[in-house]
């Protein structure tokens, strides 16, 4: 069983007009899901895992990324 | 003789039946007759040749609770053809509310509606505590019809005080909430709203979010006594949780024999399965007999930002993110540093940001110079002899970072996808949020956009179907008695509009809130005349003095 991994990290418009980060994750069991993060949370996880940009999140371990939440 | 006789219009009755050329006769606030060449004349005759005559539009998700205290027309909703509104969504209403809890509720309302503080201190007298007294406070001056929800958060606040935002309720408190809700429903509330998402001005969850399921179940039992609506804000950013909420609503609907609705539901490219999965589960629950209505807005969502706060708009530009996360004074210093600015401009690419930033629109309402408002950054940059990225920095610095930019159509923006969703019989068109998010974006004109984008442009809905979706369907879903159709004996809520031009205008800032507060609005286009309970409330671009709006009677 492979670990959960970030498949995509895209910017989308949130309900309140702020940009949100929509992270697509493939979990250990193969299920693919999306998680929406607000700006503060998204910037925190990017900083925590050393991602220079949102695109750098792609391919990373989801569990490692979550340590920044 | 009719009070008003509307002649020669293309009558769309709201039931989905085909439009017919006909006259509409109105007397004593009601539709008295519909037919060809009605005889008897009218004290006032309106020639609707070339125009559609339809029932007034119903907006089921608004936050006009406060505005109604000084503006009974809920401007500019009425001029868009909206004749009935449902305020009190998302767990927040202005009643019932004890005097000592006003400050707490104002904080929550300011967070959601973005009203200026003066709206709560200068614009009206707090004359009520109970729901019936709030009703009395607004009822005499209405130009639009109102079917108010009562908010779960204020019910909790009344019964539990400050504990409402700290803990689950005890059995005796739940019983007190039931009694209070019953009083509100007896006073004309159309249902109960609750939220699993909203926060107050200090980012604390609103009181409804501290409720356990047995509390919601007990309140729904009271709704069941009246057959009234439960509205919820689900965790809309997560499809799986939204589906769980649909299941929960279905159980409550079946157990208590009540209608339920969840709003908002969005579509976007990043999570394309969200709406299909939501609707699939809704279909399954509907097949079981549950009444669960997902609400979907018509308008796209725009991304708005300034350099005052770090925005994810820059999430793919590491050098920009680094600068924008600095404290404001350091951020401004960094942006003023020529070498730093050069590096930021270089990092957007060889086109100087033309592709990424060129179509950004300068928004009004902040410190933006008037002559720049509404123009694209690419246009302004060319005029200044700069590339767009440079212009974004210099314009921001020239205005103390208080200049906002708008990236249009950032989500819920695929007409080809959303048209069929709106046409889906499971989807309740709504979620406008009218009267909320005042300083972020305009929440008016969604009905005009329905016709311009999804009837005329894409053809996803026929004219008759579009009218039905925002008239008889919401009236039936919410139990608004004798509204939503052009039918003999029904309330004469009527919109006369040009089907070839009806639309929403461009978004623009106005400073018409109490204390000179700003909000974004959109003017109506193609709406000729709006009647509320048989009186002309808006015609040819102007409001009248008619105040014939009512608290909606319920079926």
Image (spheres, rainbow, N blue to C red):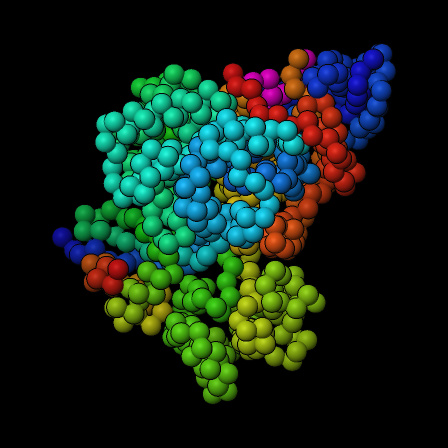
**Can residue B299 be seen by looking at this rendering?**
no
How many tags in the picture?
0
The main secondary structure of the magenta stretch is: loop
Question: Does the magenta-highlighted stretch encompass residue A2?
Answer: no
- Could you say where residue B379 lies in the image, as x and y percent from the top left? 65, 70
Quadrant occupied by the C terminus of chain A: bottom left
* Frontmost residue, B126 versus B386: B126
**Residue B81 position (above or below residue B267):** above
Q: Residue at x 32, y 26 (%)?
A: B176
Location of residue B29 by image quarter: top right
Q: Nearer the viewer, residue B406 or B166?
A: B166
Question: Residue B27: where, in percent of width, then height?
Answer: 75, 16
- Between residue A14 and residue A61, name the one nearer to us: A14
In this picture, residue B523 sits left or right of residue B267:
right
Report which quarter residue B281 is drawn in: top left
Please say if B549 is above or below B350.
Answer: above
Residue B407 relative to residue A37: left or right = right
Give the residues in magenta. Answer: B481-488
Q: At 40% from the left edge and 68% from the top edge, which residue is drawn? A: B316
Residue name at image x 25 percent, y 27 percent:
B172
Q: Position of residue B112 (x, y in %)?
A: 46, 47
């Amino acid at each position: 069983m492979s670990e959960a991994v970030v498949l995509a990290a895209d910017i989308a418009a949130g309900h309140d007009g702020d940009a949100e980060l929509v992270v697509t994750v493939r979990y250990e069991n193969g299920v693919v899901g999306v998680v929406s993060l607000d700006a503060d949370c998204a910037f925190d996880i990017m900083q925590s895992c050393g991602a220079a940009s949102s695109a750098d999140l792609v391919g990373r371990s989801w569990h490692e990324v979550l340590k920044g939440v | 003789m009719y009070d008003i006789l509307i002649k020669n219009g293309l009558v769309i009755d709201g039931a989905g039946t085909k439009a017919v050329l006909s006259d509409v006769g109105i007397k004593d606030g009601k539709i008295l007759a519909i037919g060809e060449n009605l005889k008897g004349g009218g004290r006032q005759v309106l020639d609707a040749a070339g125009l559609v005559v339809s029932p007034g539009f119903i907006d089921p998700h608004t936050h006009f609770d406060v505005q109604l205290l000084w503006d009974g027309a809920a401007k500019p909703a009425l001029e868009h053809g909206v004749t009935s509104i449902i305020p009190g969504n998302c767990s927040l209403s202005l009643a019932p509310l004890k005097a000592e809890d006003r400050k707490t509720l104002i904080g929550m309302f300011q967070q959601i509606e973005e009203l200026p503080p003066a709206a709560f201190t200068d614009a009206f007298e707090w004359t009520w505590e109970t729901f019936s007294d709030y009703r009395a406070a607004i009822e005499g001056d209405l130009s639009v019809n109102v079917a108010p929800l009562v908010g779960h958060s204020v019910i909790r606040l009344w019964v539990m005080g400050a504990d409402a935002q700290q803990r689950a309720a005890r059995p005796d408190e739940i019983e007190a909430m039931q009694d209070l809700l019953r009083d509100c429903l007896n006073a004309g509330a159309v249902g109960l709203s609750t939220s699993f998402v909203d926060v107050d001005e200090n980012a604390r969850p609103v009181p409804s979010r501290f409720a356990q399921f047995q509390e919601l179940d007990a309140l729904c039992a009271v709704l069941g006594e009246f057959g009234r609506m439960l509205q919820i804000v689900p965790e809309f950013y997560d499809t799986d949780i939204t589906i769980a909420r649909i299941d929960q609503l279905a159980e409550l609907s079946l157990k208590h024999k009540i209608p339920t609705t969840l709003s908002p539901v969005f579509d976007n490219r990043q999570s394309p399965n969200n709406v299909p999965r939501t609707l699939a589960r809704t279909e399954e629950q509907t097949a079981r007999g549950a009444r669960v209505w997902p609400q979907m807005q018509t308008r796209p969502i725009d991304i708005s930002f300034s350099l005052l706060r770090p925005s994810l708009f820059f999430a793919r530009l590491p050098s920009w993110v680094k600068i924008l996360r600095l404290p404001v004074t350091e951020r401004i210093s960094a942006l003023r540093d020529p070498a730093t600015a050069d590096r930021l401009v270089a990092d957007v690419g060889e086109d100087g940001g033309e592709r990424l930033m060129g179509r950004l629109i300068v928004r009004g309402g902040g410190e933006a110079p008037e002559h720049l408002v509404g123009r694209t950054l690419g246009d302004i940059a060319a005029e200044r002899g700069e590339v767009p990225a440079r212009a974004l920095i210099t314009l921001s610095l020239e205005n103390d970072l208080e200049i906002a930019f708008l990236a249009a159509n950032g989500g819920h923006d695929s007409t080809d996808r959303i048209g069929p969703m709106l046409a889906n019989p499971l989807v309740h068109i709504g979620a406008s949020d009218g009267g909320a998010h005042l300083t972020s974006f305009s929440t008016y004109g969604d009905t005009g956009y329905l016709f311009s984008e999804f009837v005329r442009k894409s053809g996803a809905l026929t004219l008759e179907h579009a009218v039905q979706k925002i008239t008889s369907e919401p009236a039936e879903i919410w139990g608004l008695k004798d509204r939503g159709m052009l039918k003999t004996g029904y309330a004469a809520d009527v919109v006369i509009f040009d089907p070839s031009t009806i639309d929403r205008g461009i978004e623009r800032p106005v400073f018409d809130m109490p204390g000179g507060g700003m909000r974004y609005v959109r003017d109506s286009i193609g709406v000729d005349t709006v009647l509320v309970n048989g009186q002309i409330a808006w015609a040819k671009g102007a409001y009248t003095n008619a105040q014939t709006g009512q608290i909606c009677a319920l079926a």
